[in-house]
Amino acid sequence: MGRYLVRRLLYTIPVLFGVSLIVFILFHGVAGDPVIIMLGKHASEMQVRELRHELGFDQSLGLQFLNYLKQVATFDFGRSFATRENIGSMIWNGMGPSFLLASLGFFSTLILSLIISIACAFYRGRWFDRGVGFICVVGMSVSALAYILFGQYVLAFQWGWFPISGYENGFPANLKYLAMPVLIWVLVSLGWDVRFFRAALLDEAYKDYVRTARSKGLSEVTIFYKHILKNAMIPIVTYVVIQVPFLLLGSFLLESFFSIPGIGYITVDAIRSSDFPVIKATTTLISIMMVFGNLLTDIIYTLVDPRVRLR
Amino acid sequence: MVSKRIWREAFLRTISHPMALLSLVTVFLYIGVAVFSWTHIIASPWDRVIAQSYQAPSFDSLAHIFGTDILGRSVLFKTIQATQTALLVGFWSSLVAVLIGFILGALAGYFGGWVDDWIVWFYTVFSSIPGILLLIAIAFVLEKGLLTVCLAIGLTSWVGLCRIIRGEFLKHKEREYVLAAKAIGASHMSRIFRHILPNVFHQVVINFSLMFQAAIKTEVVLSYLGLGAQGRPSWGLMIDDSKLSLGRGVWWELGAATLALMILVLAVNLLSDSLRDSLDPQLIG
Protein backbone atom coordinates (compact mmCIF):
# COMPACT_ATOMS: atom_id res chain seq x y z
CA MET A 1 0.00 0.00 0.00
CA GLY A 2 2.65 2.50 1.07
CA ARG A 3 4.89 1.61 -1.86
CA TYR A 4 2.02 1.89 -4.30
CA LEU A 5 1.14 5.33 -3.01
CA VAL A 6 4.71 6.57 -3.24
CA ARG A 7 5.00 5.23 -6.78
CA ARG A 8 1.71 6.80 -7.74
CA LEU A 9 2.76 10.12 -6.19
CA LEU A 10 6.07 10.09 -8.05
CA TYR A 11 4.23 9.35 -11.30
CA THR A 12 2.63 12.79 -11.18
CA ILE A 13 6.06 14.33 -11.92
CA PRO A 14 6.41 13.02 -15.50
CA VAL A 15 2.71 13.67 -16.05
CA LEU A 16 2.98 17.27 -14.89
CA PHE A 17 6.04 17.67 -17.10
CA GLY A 18 4.14 16.28 -20.10
CA VAL A 19 1.19 18.54 -19.43
CA SER A 20 3.44 21.59 -19.29
CA LEU A 21 5.16 20.51 -22.48
CA ILE A 22 1.91 20.10 -24.41
CA VAL A 23 0.44 23.35 -23.12
CA PHE A 24 3.68 25.10 -24.06
CA ILE A 25 3.62 23.63 -27.56
CA LEU A 26 -0.03 24.63 -27.94
CA PHE A 27 0.73 28.24 -27.14
CA HIS A 28 4.10 28.70 -28.75
CA GLY A 29 4.30 26.36 -31.68
CA VAL A 30 0.72 26.48 -32.63
CA ALA A 31 -1.45 29.39 -31.66
CA GLY A 32 0.00 31.92 -34.05
CA ASP A 33 2.17 34.89 -33.15
CA PRO A 34 0.59 36.56 -30.14
CA VAL A 35 2.57 39.74 -30.72
CA ILE A 36 1.01 40.28 -34.14
CA ILE A 37 -2.41 39.49 -32.72
CA MET A 38 -1.91 41.98 -29.89
CA LEU A 39 -0.57 44.85 -31.93
CA GLY A 40 -2.63 44.29 -35.06
CA LYS A 41 -1.35 43.85 -38.58
CA HIS A 42 -0.19 47.41 -39.04
CA ALA A 43 2.32 47.58 -36.21
CA SER A 44 5.76 48.86 -37.10
CA GLU A 45 8.81 46.61 -37.06
CA MET A 46 10.12 48.49 -34.05
CA GLN A 47 6.95 48.00 -31.96
CA VAL A 48 6.87 44.30 -32.73
CA ARG A 49 10.50 43.87 -31.74
CA GLU A 50 10.04 45.79 -28.51
CA LEU A 51 6.98 43.87 -27.39
CA ARG A 52 8.65 40.63 -28.35
CA HIS A 53 11.57 41.48 -26.15
CA GLU A 54 9.32 42.60 -23.31
CA LEU A 55 7.41 39.29 -23.36
CA GLY A 56 10.54 37.21 -23.85
CA PHE A 57 9.52 35.84 -27.26
CA ASP A 58 12.94 36.65 -28.75
CA GLN A 59 14.60 34.00 -26.58
CA SER A 60 15.22 30.46 -27.75
CA LEU A 61 12.38 27.99 -27.41
CA GLY A 62 14.26 26.05 -24.75
CA LEU A 63 14.69 29.16 -22.61
CA GLN A 64 11.06 30.07 -23.11
CA PHE A 65 10.03 26.62 -21.95
CA LEU A 66 12.19 26.98 -18.84
CA ASN A 67 10.57 30.34 -18.22
CA TYR A 68 7.18 28.76 -18.56
CA LEU A 69 8.10 26.00 -16.12
CA LYS A 70 9.15 28.72 -13.69
CA GLN A 71 5.77 30.38 -14.17
CA VAL A 72 4.03 27.08 -13.47
CA ALA A 73 6.11 26.40 -10.36
CA THR A 74 5.58 29.87 -8.87
CA PHE A 75 2.14 30.27 -10.40
CA ASP A 76 3.04 33.76 -11.52
CA PHE A 77 1.78 34.23 -15.05
CA GLY A 78 2.27 37.97 -15.19
CA ARG A 79 -0.44 40.25 -16.45
CA SER A 80 -3.30 39.90 -18.90
CA PHE A 81 -2.72 41.31 -22.40
CA ALA A 82 -6.20 42.74 -22.54
CA THR A 83 -6.77 44.30 -19.12
CA ARG A 84 -3.22 44.47 -17.70
CA GLU A 85 -4.66 42.88 -14.58
CA ASN A 86 -2.58 40.48 -12.53
CA ILE A 87 -3.56 36.97 -13.68
CA GLY A 88 -3.09 35.40 -10.27
CA SER A 89 -5.67 37.67 -8.71
CA MET A 90 -7.99 37.29 -11.73
CA ILE A 91 -8.03 33.55 -11.20
CA TRP A 92 -8.31 33.90 -7.45
CA ASN A 93 -11.38 36.12 -7.89
CA GLY A 94 -12.84 33.71 -10.43
CA MET A 95 -12.62 30.68 -8.19
CA GLY A 96 -15.34 31.84 -5.82
CA PRO A 97 -18.19 32.09 -8.35
CA SER A 98 -16.97 28.97 -10.18
CA PHE A 99 -16.90 26.97 -7.00
CA LEU A 100 -20.28 28.22 -5.88
CA LEU A 101 -21.95 27.42 -9.20
CA ALA A 102 -20.28 24.04 -9.52
CA SER A 103 -20.88 22.89 -5.97
CA LEU A 104 -24.51 23.97 -5.98
CA GLY A 105 -25.05 22.24 -9.31
CA PHE A 106 -23.11 19.17 -8.31
CA PHE A 107 -24.74 18.60 -4.93
CA SER A 108 -28.29 19.27 -6.13
CA THR A 109 -27.72 16.77 -8.94
CA LEU A 110 -26.19 14.30 -6.52
CA ILE A 111 -29.07 14.36 -4.04
CA LEU A 112 -31.74 14.21 -6.72
CA SER A 113 -30.08 11.47 -8.71
CA LEU A 114 -29.40 9.36 -5.61
CA ILE A 115 -33.07 9.48 -4.66
CA ILE A 116 -34.21 8.70 -8.19
CA SER A 117 -31.72 5.91 -8.78
CA ILE A 118 -32.48 4.22 -5.46
CA ALA A 119 -36.15 4.25 -6.37
CA CYS A 120 -35.29 2.86 -9.83
CA ALA A 121 -33.14 0.09 -8.43
CA PHE A 122 -35.77 -0.83 -5.86
CA TYR A 123 -38.50 -1.02 -8.50
CA ARG A 124 -36.13 -2.44 -11.11
CA GLY A 125 -37.72 -3.60 -14.32
CA ARG A 126 -41.11 -2.08 -13.54
CA TRP A 127 -42.72 0.79 -15.39
CA PHE A 128 -41.27 3.41 -13.02
CA ASP A 129 -37.72 2.22 -13.68
CA ARG A 130 -38.26 1.97 -17.41
CA GLY A 131 -39.93 5.37 -17.62
CA VAL A 132 -37.17 7.09 -15.68
CA GLY A 133 -34.54 5.31 -17.73
CA PHE A 134 -36.10 6.58 -20.92
CA ILE A 135 -36.44 10.14 -19.62
CA CYS A 136 -32.76 10.05 -18.62
CA VAL A 137 -31.69 9.13 -22.14
CA VAL A 138 -33.93 11.84 -23.59
CA GLY A 139 -32.41 14.38 -21.19
CA MET A 140 -28.90 13.32 -22.18
CA SER A 141 -29.76 13.69 -25.85
CA VAL A 142 -30.51 17.40 -25.75
CA SER A 143 -27.64 19.74 -26.44
CA ALA A 144 -26.60 21.75 -23.36
CA LEU A 145 -26.80 24.85 -25.51
CA ALA A 146 -30.48 24.18 -26.21
CA TYR A 147 -31.21 23.99 -22.47
CA ILE A 148 -29.40 27.26 -21.93
CA LEU A 149 -31.18 29.09 -24.74
CA PHE A 150 -34.55 27.70 -23.73
CA GLY A 151 -33.98 28.73 -20.12
CA GLN A 152 -32.89 32.21 -21.08
CA TYR A 153 -35.75 32.71 -23.48
CA VAL A 154 -38.71 31.09 -21.76
CA LEU A 155 -37.90 31.06 -18.06
CA ALA A 156 -35.97 34.30 -17.86
CA PHE A 157 -37.16 36.47 -20.73
CA GLN A 158 -40.79 35.49 -21.14
CA TRP A 159 -41.80 34.39 -17.66
CA GLY A 160 -39.32 36.55 -15.80
CA TRP A 161 -38.55 33.93 -13.15
CA PHE A 162 -34.80 34.52 -13.22
CA PRO A 163 -32.46 37.26 -14.38
CA ILE A 164 -31.29 36.55 -17.96
CA SER A 165 -27.62 36.79 -17.05
CA GLY A 166 -25.20 38.63 -14.83
CA TYR A 167 -23.76 38.26 -11.37
CA GLU A 168 -23.58 40.07 -8.07
CA ASN A 169 -21.25 39.32 -5.22
CA GLY A 170 -22.59 38.80 -1.73
CA PHE A 171 -24.61 35.96 -0.32
CA PRO A 172 -28.34 36.31 -1.00
CA ALA A 173 -27.87 38.37 -4.16
CA ASN A 174 -25.73 35.84 -6.01
CA LEU A 175 -28.22 33.03 -5.51
CA LYS A 176 -30.71 34.86 -7.70
CA TYR A 177 -28.23 34.79 -10.57
CA LEU A 178 -27.06 31.26 -9.93
CA ALA A 179 -30.53 29.68 -9.77
CA MET A 180 -30.99 29.09 -13.49
CA PRO A 181 -27.43 27.97 -14.28
CA VAL A 182 -27.73 25.48 -11.42
CA LEU A 183 -31.06 24.27 -12.76
CA ILE A 184 -29.52 23.71 -16.19
CA TRP A 185 -26.51 21.99 -14.61
CA VAL A 186 -28.92 19.57 -12.94
CA LEU A 187 -30.87 18.97 -16.17
CA VAL A 188 -27.71 18.28 -18.18
CA SER A 189 -26.07 15.91 -15.71
CA LEU A 190 -29.02 14.20 -14.04
CA GLY A 191 -29.40 11.54 -16.72
CA TRP A 192 -25.75 10.45 -16.51
CA ASP A 193 -25.74 10.29 -12.74
CA VAL A 194 -29.00 8.40 -12.41
CA ARG A 195 -27.84 5.81 -14.93
CA PHE A 196 -24.46 5.44 -13.25
CA PHE A 197 -25.89 5.06 -9.75
CA ARG A 198 -28.59 2.70 -10.91
CA ALA A 199 -26.02 0.51 -12.64
CA ALA A 200 -23.86 0.52 -9.50
CA LEU A 201 -26.85 -0.53 -7.40
CA LEU A 202 -27.96 -3.23 -9.80
CA ASP A 203 -24.43 -4.59 -10.05
CA GLU A 204 -24.79 -5.57 -6.43
CA ALA A 205 -28.43 -6.64 -6.63
CA TYR A 206 -27.63 -9.88 -8.47
CA LYS A 207 -24.68 -11.02 -6.39
CA ASP A 208 -24.60 -14.23 -4.41
CA TYR A 209 -24.73 -12.63 -0.98
CA VAL A 210 -28.03 -11.01 -1.93
CA ARG A 211 -29.45 -14.38 -2.86
CA THR A 212 -28.22 -15.75 0.46
CA ALA A 213 -29.87 -12.90 2.32
CA ARG A 214 -33.10 -13.51 0.45
CA SER A 215 -33.06 -17.24 1.19
CA LYS A 216 -32.56 -16.44 4.86
CA GLY A 217 -36.00 -14.85 4.59
CA LEU A 218 -35.03 -11.19 4.93
CA SER A 219 -37.51 -8.73 3.54
CA GLU A 220 -36.75 -6.98 0.25
CA VAL A 221 -36.53 -3.63 2.02
CA THR A 222 -33.96 -4.91 4.52
CA ILE A 223 -31.94 -6.56 1.77
CA PHE A 224 -31.96 -3.38 -0.22
CA TYR A 225 -31.01 -0.93 2.51
CA LYS A 226 -28.80 -3.13 4.68
CA HIS A 227 -26.94 -5.08 2.00
CA ILE A 228 -27.18 -3.73 -1.52
CA LEU A 229 -27.01 -0.04 -0.70
CA LYS A 230 -24.05 -0.50 1.61
CA ASN A 231 -21.95 -2.27 -1.01
CA ALA A 232 -23.03 -0.08 -3.89
CA MET A 233 -21.85 2.92 -1.90
CA ILE A 234 -18.23 2.06 -2.79
CA PRO A 235 -18.45 3.05 -6.47
CA ILE A 236 -20.88 5.85 -5.65
CA VAL A 237 -18.69 7.46 -3.00
CA THR A 238 -15.69 7.15 -5.29
CA TYR A 239 -17.60 8.76 -8.10
CA VAL A 240 -18.59 11.64 -5.86
CA VAL A 241 -15.22 12.22 -4.22
CA ILE A 242 -13.27 12.26 -7.46
CA GLN A 243 -15.39 15.11 -8.76
CA VAL A 244 -14.76 17.39 -5.82
CA PRO A 245 -11.43 18.85 -7.04
CA PHE A 246 -13.08 19.70 -10.36
CA LEU A 247 -15.70 21.81 -8.66
CA LEU A 248 -13.25 24.71 -8.53
CA LEU A 249 -13.32 24.85 -12.29
CA GLY A 250 -17.00 25.55 -12.79
CA SER A 251 -18.38 25.24 -16.27
CA PHE A 252 -17.22 26.94 -19.45
CA LEU A 253 -20.55 27.07 -21.21
CA LEU A 254 -22.76 28.02 -18.28
CA GLU A 255 -20.43 30.71 -17.02
CA SER A 256 -19.89 32.33 -20.36
CA PHE A 257 -23.58 32.26 -21.25
CA PHE A 258 -24.79 33.63 -17.94
CA SER A 259 -21.86 36.03 -17.50
CA ILE A 260 -20.83 34.51 -14.19
CA PRO A 261 -17.28 35.76 -13.65
CA GLY A 262 -15.68 32.36 -12.89
CA ILE A 263 -12.70 30.53 -14.37
CA GLY A 264 -14.67 29.31 -17.35
CA TYR A 265 -15.90 32.81 -18.17
CA ILE A 266 -12.39 34.20 -17.88
CA THR A 267 -11.08 31.50 -20.21
CA VAL A 268 -13.74 31.88 -22.90
CA ASP A 269 -13.35 35.64 -22.73
CA ALA A 270 -9.58 35.28 -23.12
CA ILE A 271 -10.04 32.95 -26.09
CA ARG A 272 -12.26 35.52 -27.77
CA SER A 273 -9.71 38.31 -27.28
CA SER A 274 -6.61 36.12 -27.91
CA ASP A 275 -5.37 36.93 -24.42
CA PHE A 276 -2.68 34.24 -24.39
CA PRO A 277 -1.19 34.61 -20.92
CA VAL A 278 -4.65 34.20 -19.42
CA ILE A 279 -5.53 31.15 -21.55
CA LYS A 280 -2.15 29.66 -20.68
CA ALA A 281 -2.69 30.25 -16.98
CA THR A 282 -6.19 28.80 -16.84
CA THR A 283 -5.25 25.83 -19.04
CA THR A 284 -2.29 25.08 -16.81
CA LEU A 285 -4.34 25.47 -13.67
CA ILE A 286 -7.11 23.20 -14.92
CA SER A 287 -4.64 20.59 -16.15
CA ILE A 288 -2.79 20.51 -12.84
CA MET A 289 -6.08 20.13 -11.02
CA MET A 290 -6.94 17.22 -13.30
CA VAL A 291 -3.60 15.55 -12.55
CA PHE A 292 -4.18 15.83 -8.82
CA GLY A 293 -7.82 14.84 -9.22
CA ASN A 294 -6.66 11.64 -10.94
CA LEU A 295 -4.11 11.05 -8.21
CA LEU A 296 -6.80 11.44 -5.58
CA THR A 297 -9.04 9.03 -7.49
CA ASP A 298 -6.39 6.34 -7.50
CA ILE A 299 -5.69 6.81 -3.81
CA ILE A 300 -9.38 6.57 -2.98
CA TYR A 301 -9.69 3.43 -5.07
CA THR A 302 -6.94 1.76 -3.09
CA LEU A 303 -8.62 2.79 0.13
CA VAL A 304 -12.07 1.46 -0.73
CA ASP A 305 -11.12 -1.53 -2.85
CA PRO A 306 -8.31 -3.70 -1.47
CA ARG A 307 -8.00 -5.61 -4.76
CA VAL A 308 -6.41 -2.59 -6.45
CA ARG A 309 -3.38 -2.72 -4.16
CA LEU A 310 -2.24 -5.99 -5.63
CA ARG A 311 -1.36 -4.36 -8.92
CA MET B 1 -17.24 -19.18 -35.98
CA VAL B 2 -18.47 -18.20 -32.56
CA SER B 3 -18.14 -14.47 -33.05
CA LYS B 4 -20.40 -14.50 -36.11
CA ARG B 5 -23.13 -16.14 -34.10
CA ILE B 6 -22.81 -13.50 -31.39
CA TRP B 7 -23.26 -10.74 -33.95
CA ARG B 8 -26.28 -12.40 -35.49
CA GLU B 9 -27.79 -12.92 -32.08
CA ALA B 10 -27.09 -9.32 -31.18
CA PHE B 11 -28.84 -8.20 -34.33
CA LEU B 12 -31.84 -10.46 -33.69
CA ARG B 13 -32.04 -9.30 -30.10
CA THR B 14 -31.93 -5.69 -31.23
CA ILE B 15 -34.75 -6.02 -33.72
CA SER B 16 -36.89 -7.98 -31.29
CA HIS B 17 -36.87 -5.03 -28.88
CA PRO B 18 -39.43 -2.47 -30.08
CA MET B 19 -37.45 0.49 -28.71
CA ALA B 20 -34.16 -0.67 -30.19
CA LEU B 21 -35.81 -1.47 -33.52
CA LEU B 22 -37.36 1.98 -33.59
CA SER B 23 -33.95 3.55 -32.93
CA LEU B 24 -32.36 1.50 -35.69
CA VAL B 25 -35.08 2.57 -38.12
CA THR B 26 -34.64 6.20 -37.03
CA VAL B 27 -30.90 6.11 -37.64
CA PHE B 28 -31.47 4.65 -41.12
CA LEU B 29 -34.11 7.31 -41.74
CA TYR B 30 -31.56 10.01 -40.97
CA ILE B 31 -29.04 8.38 -43.27
CA GLY B 32 -31.71 8.26 -45.97
CA VAL B 33 -32.57 11.93 -45.47
CA ALA B 34 -28.88 12.84 -45.65
CA VAL B 35 -28.37 10.89 -48.86
CA PHE B 36 -31.50 12.27 -50.52
CA SER B 37 -30.68 15.85 -49.59
CA TRP B 38 -27.10 15.38 -50.70
CA THR B 39 -28.26 14.25 -54.13
CA HIS B 40 -30.66 17.23 -54.26
CA ILE B 41 -33.75 15.05 -54.35
CA ILE B 42 -35.29 16.67 -51.26
CA ALA B 43 -34.89 20.03 -49.54
CA SER B 44 -33.03 21.61 -52.39
CA PRO B 45 -31.97 24.34 -52.89
CA TRP B 46 -31.80 25.14 -49.21
CA ASP B 47 -30.36 28.64 -49.63
CA ARG B 48 -33.19 30.01 -51.76
CA VAL B 49 -35.13 32.92 -50.24
CA ILE B 50 -38.74 31.79 -49.99
CA ALA B 51 -40.30 34.47 -47.79
CA GLN B 52 -39.55 37.42 -45.57
CA SER B 53 -37.01 37.28 -42.80
CA TYR B 54 -38.14 35.41 -39.67
CA GLN B 55 -41.55 34.32 -40.86
CA ALA B 56 -43.33 32.20 -38.27
CA PRO B 57 -44.11 28.57 -39.06
CA SER B 58 -47.22 28.08 -41.18
CA PHE B 59 -48.86 25.30 -43.14
CA ASP B 60 -48.81 27.18 -46.47
CA SER B 61 -46.39 24.72 -47.94
CA LEU B 62 -43.95 22.12 -46.73
CA ALA B 63 -41.05 24.56 -46.88
CA HIS B 64 -42.84 26.94 -44.49
CA ILE B 65 -43.56 24.38 -41.80
CA PHE B 66 -40.67 25.49 -39.58
CA GLY B 67 -40.79 29.13 -40.69
CA THR B 68 -37.88 31.05 -42.16
CA ASP B 69 -34.50 32.25 -40.91
CA ILE B 70 -32.91 35.71 -40.90
CA LEU B 71 -32.44 35.71 -44.68
CA GLY B 72 -35.88 34.28 -45.40
CA ARG B 73 -34.66 30.75 -46.16
CA SER B 74 -36.71 27.73 -45.21
CA VAL B 75 -35.73 26.41 -41.78
CA LEU B 76 -37.04 22.97 -42.69
CA PHE B 77 -34.74 22.72 -45.70
CA LYS B 78 -31.84 23.97 -43.66
CA THR B 79 -32.52 21.41 -40.94
CA ILE B 80 -32.69 18.63 -43.50
CA GLN B 81 -29.52 19.68 -45.26
CA ALA B 82 -27.74 19.91 -41.92
CA THR B 83 -28.32 16.19 -41.41
CA GLN B 84 -25.38 15.59 -43.74
CA THR B 85 -23.12 17.75 -41.59
CA ALA B 86 -24.16 15.98 -38.41
CA LEU B 87 -23.68 12.49 -39.83
CA LEU B 88 -20.35 13.41 -41.40
CA VAL B 89 -19.08 14.93 -38.16
CA GLY B 90 -20.35 11.98 -36.14
CA PHE B 91 -18.88 9.39 -38.49
CA TRP B 92 -15.47 10.85 -39.27
CA SER B 93 -14.63 12.09 -35.80
CA SER B 94 -15.62 8.75 -34.28
CA LEU B 95 -13.56 6.95 -36.90
CA VAL B 96 -10.49 9.07 -36.11
CA ALA B 97 -10.98 8.50 -32.39
CA VAL B 98 -11.57 4.77 -32.80
CA LEU B 99 -8.48 4.32 -34.96
CA ILE B 100 -6.19 6.20 -32.57
CA GLY B 101 -7.76 4.66 -29.48
CA PHE B 102 -7.69 1.13 -30.82
CA ILE B 103 -4.17 1.19 -32.20
CA LEU B 104 -2.58 2.83 -29.15
CA GLY B 105 -4.62 0.70 -26.74
CA ALA B 106 -3.77 -2.51 -28.60
CA LEU B 107 -0.06 -1.69 -28.75
CA ALA B 108 0.07 -0.78 -25.07
CA GLY B 109 -1.85 -3.80 -23.87
CA TYR B 110 -0.28 -6.29 -26.24
CA PHE B 111 3.39 -5.38 -26.02
CA GLY B 112 3.48 -4.07 -22.45
CA GLY B 113 6.87 -2.93 -21.17
CA TRP B 114 8.19 0.43 -22.30
CA VAL B 115 5.61 0.72 -25.09
CA ASP B 116 2.88 0.50 -22.46
CA ASP B 117 4.68 2.98 -20.19
CA TRP B 118 4.92 5.59 -22.93
CA ILE B 119 1.37 5.19 -24.17
CA VAL B 120 -0.09 5.29 -20.67
CA TRP B 121 1.99 8.38 -19.93
CA PHE B 122 0.82 9.96 -23.15
CA TYR B 123 -2.87 9.44 -22.56
CA THR B 124 -2.63 10.39 -18.90
CA VAL B 125 -1.07 13.68 -19.95
CA PHE B 126 -3.50 14.11 -22.78
CA SER B 127 -6.57 13.49 -20.67
CA SER B 128 -5.34 15.95 -18.05
CA ILE B 129 -5.61 18.86 -20.44
CA PRO B 130 -9.22 20.03 -20.67
CA GLY B 131 -10.72 18.67 -23.85
CA ILE B 132 -12.41 21.88 -24.81
CA LEU B 133 -9.12 23.80 -24.81
CA LEU B 134 -7.42 21.15 -26.94
CA LEU B 135 -10.39 21.31 -29.30
CA ILE B 136 -10.02 25.06 -29.54
CA ALA B 137 -6.27 24.85 -30.07
CA ILE B 138 -6.63 22.28 -32.87
CA ALA B 139 -9.46 24.22 -34.48
CA PHE B 140 -7.29 27.36 -34.32
CA VAL B 141 -4.32 25.80 -36.06
CA LEU B 142 -6.12 24.11 -38.91
CA GLU B 143 -8.27 26.01 -41.32
CA LYS B 144 -11.86 26.43 -40.25
CA GLY B 145 -14.20 23.92 -41.78
CA LEU B 146 -15.83 20.54 -41.52
CA LEU B 147 -12.58 18.60 -41.75
CA THR B 148 -11.11 20.55 -38.85
CA VAL B 149 -14.20 19.94 -36.75
CA CYS B 150 -13.93 16.19 -37.36
CA LEU B 151 -10.20 16.09 -36.69
CA ALA B 152 -10.46 18.22 -33.57
CA ILE B 153 -13.24 16.12 -32.09
CA GLY B 154 -11.56 12.87 -33.15
CA LEU B 155 -8.18 13.84 -31.75
CA THR B 156 -9.66 14.73 -28.38
CA SER B 157 -11.98 11.80 -27.74
CA TRP B 158 -9.90 8.63 -28.10
CA VAL B 159 -8.64 8.24 -24.53
CA GLY B 160 -11.68 6.37 -23.17
CA LEU B 161 -11.56 3.67 -25.83
CA CYS B 162 -7.76 3.46 -25.57
CA ARG B 163 -8.02 2.63 -21.85
CA ILE B 164 -10.66 -0.03 -22.47
CA ILE B 165 -8.82 -1.66 -25.37
CA ARG B 166 -5.55 -1.68 -23.42
CA GLY B 167 -7.29 -3.48 -20.56
CA GLU B 168 -8.88 -6.00 -22.92
CA PHE B 169 -5.57 -6.75 -24.66
CA LEU B 170 -3.82 -7.18 -21.31
CA LYS B 171 -6.44 -9.77 -20.47
CA HIS B 172 -6.59 -11.51 -23.84
CA LYS B 173 -2.91 -11.79 -24.72
CA GLU B 174 -2.37 -14.47 -22.05
CA ARG B 175 -5.48 -16.45 -22.97
CA GLU B 176 -5.05 -19.94 -24.33
CA TYR B 177 -6.31 -19.24 -27.83
CA VAL B 178 -3.71 -16.53 -28.27
CA LEU B 179 -0.95 -18.68 -26.84
CA ALA B 180 -2.05 -21.44 -29.22
CA ALA B 181 -1.86 -19.03 -32.14
CA LYS B 182 1.63 -18.07 -31.00
CA ALA B 183 2.62 -21.72 -30.80
CA ILE B 184 1.68 -22.34 -34.42
CA GLY B 185 3.76 -19.33 -35.39
CA ALA B 186 1.24 -16.54 -35.81
CA SER B 187 2.95 -13.15 -36.07
CA HIS B 188 2.27 -10.22 -33.75
CA MET B 189 0.12 -8.56 -36.40
CA SER B 190 -1.87 -11.71 -36.94
CA ARG B 191 -2.40 -12.22 -33.22
CA ILE B 192 -3.51 -8.61 -32.74
CA PHE B 193 -5.83 -8.32 -35.71
CA ARG B 194 -6.96 -11.85 -36.53
CA HIS B 195 -7.19 -13.36 -33.10
CA ILE B 196 -7.73 -10.72 -30.45
CA LEU B 197 -9.52 -8.03 -32.46
CA PRO B 198 -12.70 -10.07 -33.12
CA ASN B 199 -12.95 -10.70 -29.38
CA VAL B 200 -12.77 -7.04 -28.39
CA PHE B 201 -14.61 -5.68 -31.39
CA HIS B 202 -17.86 -5.24 -29.46
CA GLN B 203 -16.11 -2.60 -27.34
CA VAL B 204 -15.14 -0.77 -30.51
CA VAL B 205 -18.70 -0.84 -31.80
CA ILE B 206 -20.24 0.32 -28.52
CA ASN B 207 -17.71 3.11 -28.15
CA PHE B 208 -18.11 4.16 -31.75
CA SER B 209 -21.81 4.77 -31.25
CA LEU B 210 -21.20 6.62 -27.98
CA MET B 211 -18.58 8.83 -29.63
CA PHE B 212 -20.90 9.38 -32.56
CA GLN B 213 -23.58 11.02 -30.47
CA ALA B 214 -21.04 12.93 -28.37
CA ALA B 215 -19.41 14.31 -31.51
CA ILE B 216 -22.71 15.64 -32.81
CA LYS B 217 -23.26 17.46 -29.53
CA THR B 218 -19.68 18.77 -29.48
CA GLU B 219 -20.18 20.27 -32.92
CA VAL B 220 -22.85 22.50 -31.39
CA VAL B 221 -20.41 23.80 -28.79
CA LEU B 222 -17.74 24.41 -31.44
CA SER B 223 -20.26 26.36 -33.49
CA TYR B 224 -21.04 28.45 -30.46
CA LEU B 225 -17.34 29.28 -30.16
CA GLY B 226 -17.26 30.23 -33.84
CA LEU B 227 -15.17 27.19 -34.79
CA GLY B 228 -17.86 25.05 -36.39
CA ALA B 229 -18.54 24.05 -39.98
CA GLN B 230 -18.39 26.86 -42.48
CA GLY B 231 -20.54 27.60 -45.50
CA ARG B 232 -22.96 24.73 -45.01
CA PRO B 233 -25.95 24.40 -42.73
CA SER B 234 -25.41 22.68 -39.42
CA TRP B 235 -27.60 22.26 -36.36
CA GLY B 236 -24.86 23.82 -34.27
CA LEU B 237 -24.84 26.96 -36.40
CA MET B 238 -28.64 27.09 -36.32
CA ILE B 239 -28.69 26.85 -32.53
CA ASP B 240 -25.93 29.43 -32.32
CA ASP B 241 -27.74 31.78 -34.70
CA SER B 242 -30.89 31.61 -32.64
CA LYS B 243 -29.23 33.08 -29.55
CA LEU B 244 -29.69 36.48 -31.20
CA SER B 245 -33.04 35.91 -32.85
CA LEU B 246 -34.61 34.42 -29.71
CA GLY B 247 -34.90 37.89 -28.21
CA ARG B 248 -37.29 38.73 -31.03
CA GLY B 249 -39.40 35.68 -30.32
CA VAL B 250 -37.95 33.55 -33.11
CA TRP B 251 -38.00 30.12 -31.49
CA TRP B 252 -38.52 27.90 -34.53
CA GLU B 253 -34.93 27.75 -35.74
CA LEU B 254 -33.74 26.67 -32.29
CA GLY B 255 -36.68 24.31 -32.01
CA ALA B 256 -36.16 22.61 -35.36
CA ALA B 257 -32.41 22.12 -34.89
CA THR B 258 -32.77 20.94 -31.29
CA LEU B 259 -35.51 18.50 -32.20
CA ALA B 260 -33.60 17.07 -35.16
CA LEU B 261 -30.48 16.69 -33.06
CA MET B 262 -32.31 15.26 -30.09
CA ILE B 263 -34.07 12.54 -32.05
CA LEU B 264 -30.87 11.41 -33.75
CA VAL B 265 -28.80 11.44 -30.56
CA LEU B 266 -31.59 9.72 -28.65
CA ALA B 267 -31.81 6.98 -31.26
CA VAL B 268 -28.04 6.46 -31.23
CA ASN B 269 -28.02 6.42 -27.42
CA LEU B 270 -30.77 3.83 -27.22
CA LEU B 271 -29.02 1.79 -29.88
CA SER B 272 -25.75 1.92 -27.92
CA ASP B 273 -27.60 0.69 -24.85
CA SER B 274 -29.08 -2.24 -26.70
CA LEU B 275 -25.75 -3.01 -28.36
CA ARG B 276 -24.13 -3.07 -24.95
CA ASP B 277 -26.85 -5.29 -23.56
CA SER B 278 -26.53 -7.79 -26.36
CA LEU B 279 -22.76 -7.73 -26.93
CA ASP B 280 -21.22 -7.36 -23.49
CA PRO B 281 -20.34 -10.89 -22.36
CA GLN B 282 -20.54 -9.85 -18.70
CA LEU B 283 -24.16 -8.90 -19.16
CA ILE B 284 -25.01 -11.93 -21.25
CA GLY B 285 -23.70 -13.98 -18.32
Image (cartoon, coloured by chain):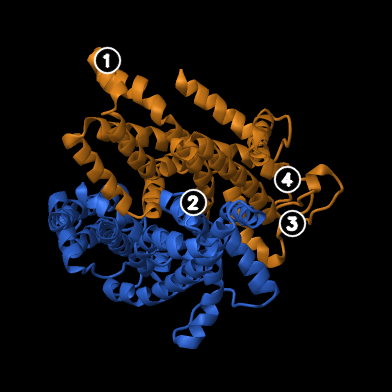
Q: Disc 3 to disc 4, how far (Cα)?
A: 13 Å
Q: Amino acid at mark 1?
A: Ala
Name the residue that disc number 4 marks: B76
C-alpha distance separating marks 1 and 2? 45 Å
Check disc 3 and report the residue beneath it: B54
Q: Nearer the viewer, mark 1 or mark 3?
A: 1
How far apart are the alpha carbons under marks 1 and 3? 65 Å
Marked residue nearer the N-terminal end (1 or 4)? 4
CA–CA distance between discs 4 and 2? 22 Å
Coordinates of residue B18 in the picture (x, y in percent): 68, 39
Task: From this view, report whether residue A20 is shown above or below residue B84.
Answer: below
Residue A159 vs residue A201: left or right?
Answer: right
Front of the two marks 3 and 4: 4
**Mark 1 = which residue?**
B186
The residue labelled by disc 2 is: B222
Instruction: Describe the element under mark 1 as helix, strand or loop.
Output: loop
Q: Mark 2: few, some, or many residues within 10 Å (few <14, many ≥20)?
A: many
Chain in orange, by letter, is B
- The shade of chain A is blue
Badge 4 amino acid: Leu
Indicate the amino acid at tag 2: Leu
Give the image location of residue B177, x and y in percent.
Answer: 31, 21
